[in-house]
């Protein structure tokens, strides 16, 4: 069974910080395991005080929904799914989890082979900026966002 460790997050956080700095967007970043438990969290200087909570919630949401269905490859698709079907359900899910359900760009699952090992969340810019920063960092460290057999 593969797993993600805190030490595995450092290169990702460095790549996030590099890209976010180049874009002039201070962010926070979080990585959770496949069950949504926090592995690592970091906030850049000047990022908003709430951004770590949002980054964690984004990662948690992706881990939760991606483990339920391959239809949910990232936070943007989860957000679209709720908007089209039942926006109130997202509010209810957030309330039931103590605010840990936030569907937005900048959050994606992490796979090793066919195994979901976790998810990351980036928060501080717009949804689109967070997505660009996360995709860049994921590419730098070589994390896969889909199962190998997808």
Image (cartoon, rainbow, N blue to C red):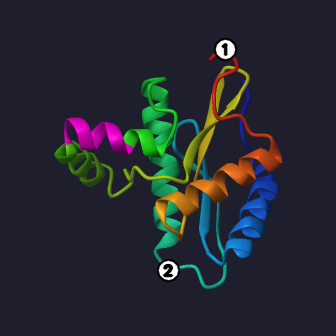
- Return the residue at label 1: 149
Q: Nearer the viewer, residue 57 or 22?
A: 22
Which stretch is magenta?
79-86
Looking at the rendered structure, the secondary structure element under dot 2 is loop
Please indicate whether residue 72 sits to the left or right of residue 15 in the image: left
- Return the residue at label 2: 49
> Which residue sits at x=38%, y=53%?
102
Please indicate whether residue 12 sits to the left or right of residue 98 in the image: right
Give the answer, above or below, for where 35 lies relative to 93.
above
Is there any visible trace of residue 20 in the rendered image? yes
Q: Position of residue 77 (x, y in %)?
A: 42, 39
Looking at this view, name the residue that lies furthest to the bottom: 46
> Which residue sits at x=48%, y=31%?
66
Q: Nearer the viewer, residue 106 or 114?
A: 106
Give the answer, above or below, for where 59 lies relative to 49.
above
> Which residue sits at x=62%, y=62%?
29
Select label 2 or label 1 by which is in front: 1
């Amino acid at each position: 069974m593969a797993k993600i460790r805190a030490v595995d997050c450092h290169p990702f956080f460095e790549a996030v910080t590099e890209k976010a700095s180049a874009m002039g967007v201070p962010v926070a970043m979080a990585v959770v395991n496949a069950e949504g438990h926090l592995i690592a969290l970091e906030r850049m200087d000047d990022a908003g005080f709430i951004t770590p909570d949002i980054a964690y919630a984004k990662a948690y949401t992706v881990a939760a929904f991606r483990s339920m269905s391959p239809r949910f490859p990232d936070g943007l698709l989860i957000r679209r799914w709720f908007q089209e079907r039942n926006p109130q359900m997202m509010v209810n899910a957030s309330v039931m989890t103590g605010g840990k359900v936030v569907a937005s760009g900048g959050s994606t699952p992490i796979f090793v082979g066919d195994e979901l090992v976790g998810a990351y969340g980036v928060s501080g810019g717009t949804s689109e900026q967070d997505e660009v920063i996360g995709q860049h960092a994921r590419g730098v460290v070589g994390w896969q966002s889909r199962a190998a057999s997808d």
